[in-house]
Amino acid sequence: MESPPQSKKLMKNKDVSHMNTGAETQQHAENGDLFIQHSKSTDFSQSSRVTGNNSCASPSGTVYTSDREEGALFGSETEKKPTGIRLVVIMISLFLSLLLVSLDQSIVSTALPAIASSFHALDEIEWIGTAYILPMTAFQPLFGKVADVFGRKETLLASITLFLVGSGLAGASTSMIMLCIMRGIQGLGAAGIAPLVVIIINDMVSLRDCAKYQGLLGLCWATGSIAGPLVGGILAENAGWMWIFLINLPIGIAALFILLIFLRSNQCGHQKQHHQRQGQVNDEEFSLWQKIARIDFVGTVLFISSIMCFLLATQWAGTTYPWTSQIIISLYASSFGLLAVSLTVSWRISHDPIMPSWIFKDRTTVALIIMCVAISMAMFINIYYLPIYFQVVNGDTPARAGIEVLPYLLPIDVLSVLVGLLVSKTGHYQFTFWIGTILIVIGGVLQSFLSISSPTMDQVLFLAVTGTGIGCCVQNFYIAAQVIASRRAPKEVATLVSSISFFEYLGFACGIAVGGSVFSNLLGHLLRRDTALPEQDIIRIKKNPAIIRTLPTELHKQVIQAFSGALQWVFVALATCGTVAFVASLCMTPYKISCEEEEEQDANSNTDQQAI
């Protein structure tokens, strides 16, 4: 059988010595098949194009061929991208899936008192939120790797199914322990849904169009965050708290069946990347057990254990246990020790690590990770502690406090869409990080001046500044990740995007924990310093702020001042996060979404007509 012209061109050019430093690279063809052998010693800085086409070397020295070339060499494996009504239906289903994940982060907040009364477990109520966010954060990198091996569609459908099972059983829970376990199953499903929705959209559209859809994803996410407390309160009051979980079932089942019917595996980028790493030809040669064996389970378990220890320590430090307590020190020590072992196993033993080493060797990628964590921390510090300011310091009702938070949430919602459109039009995203992080710093500093006597207009303005800054940045993490991966390691786009999603949720968890630690420690200090309250009453006030209303006028004012002072330092922590993010943004290489990258990404999903 005669090889196609493009394949011939690849086989003729056998001189690829410019890629390696002392490493031998060899190409030969047999019956139209291309084999590439290489040494693993290739340095990242020496990665370059091969044969003048779209092949490139990964940071580990692996030679990757573009999917356009693969189409010529191995035959057609992908179909044209969905368009028209089919694309609209798929996108709506993906947005609904992400909406459920976003909704479940905040929907329980207004139902917590009802749940606590039902199970008589007010002292355990914090675990309803923690049981969801811990697995959601820790397992995201694993789902990205599983998607690389088994396919995007299959992994997404499994994740949605897991989420729905957890939702149904959470609504049927008969104890706090059962509810927390089911929330953990929900979080496990959400850990797959969140990154895979982004990855699949990236597979189906060009990088420029992807910016538009990232904006819509931001709108979807913000809508869930805003609507969650309102929907949860209405359901808990009128239908029972169990319906805040059961409401997921009809929406999730509809999205599941639509994706099952309309989304095709070969339209959402199940790229055959692993056989290329080994110089093999056809991924179909791998059996199911061989595919499973290629997942780095040992490194993954160690990595997840490290993250769980870190999040638990950060959650408990300064609140449940003192910072210097033996359990907090042990958890942090275990976290860093497990992390070191997991990275050693993944990078030195595993052939397919959950997070490739190049992610932490590239300056731009590391800067993106730092910025992602810092901005996510700032975002959730406000989401969790602004309601305390409005309800305790201003004395507003929960419903009014929900309205007063809108000047912060609405700019995030609107800017996510507008910035996505702007990036799509200009091809530049770096300037949005610079502007956004500066506004976060300014907004955080302004918020630190909020007090009992702050006028409403100041509150609205200060929150709008911070919200605008976060809105400029929050959805561009994924655009930046896709562009960086397309230049550094084209076959690792899914891995990097899922890693960024993981670090974003890690930032959410750390923001809640760090904000809580700052607030709790400073509140206790200020109450002891500025009031004559006994220690027992201070502990009661920290657990139940409603007691403040029963205090005498003068003591009431002193306690409110203490709350205001503690929250001011929480907002200083927010400004500090913005500062760290701004410095990190300056360390990033300002890439542009180029036409060539769009063409390469198009080739990753379109059918190549020159099959053997």
Image (tube, helix red, strand yellow):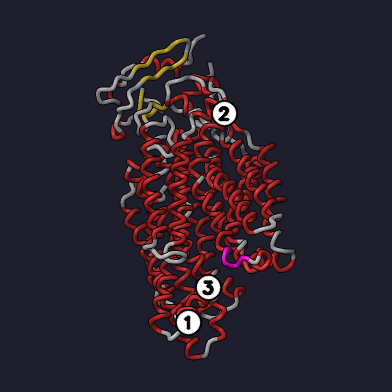
Q: Residue at x 35, y 34 (%)?
A: 59
Q: Distance from label 2 to label 1 (Cα)? A: 62 Å
Residue 292: x and y in percent read: 53, 30
- Say how many tags the image has: 3
Is label 3 in contact with label 1 (beta carbons under 8 Å)?
no
When asked about the image quadrant of residue 607, the answer is top right
Is label 2 in contact with label 3 (beta carbons under 8 Å)?
no
Say which of 476 and 251 sits in front.
251
Q: Residue at x 52, y 25 (%)?
A: 290
Q: Residue furthest right?
A: 239
Residue 310: x and y in percent read: 43, 53
Count residues near mark 2 (Cα–Cα under 10 Å), then give few for <14, some for 14-19, many for 20+: many
Span highlighted in magenta in the image:
121-125
Say which of 37 and 322 sits in front.
322
Up/down of 53 relative to 485, above or below: above
Up/down of 585 relative to 324, above or below: above
Residue 289: x and y in percent read: 55, 26
Q: Which residue bears the numbered disc 1? A: 560
Q: Residue at x 60, y 48 (%)?
A: 185
The answer to whether residue 591 is visible is no
Q: Which residue bears the numbered disc 3? A: 543
In terms of secondary structure, where does tag 3 sit?
helix
When asked about the image quadrant of residue 325, the answer is bottom left
Marking on residue 293:
none
Q: Distance from label 2 to label 3 (Cα)? A: 57 Å
At label 2, which amino acid type do we have? Thr
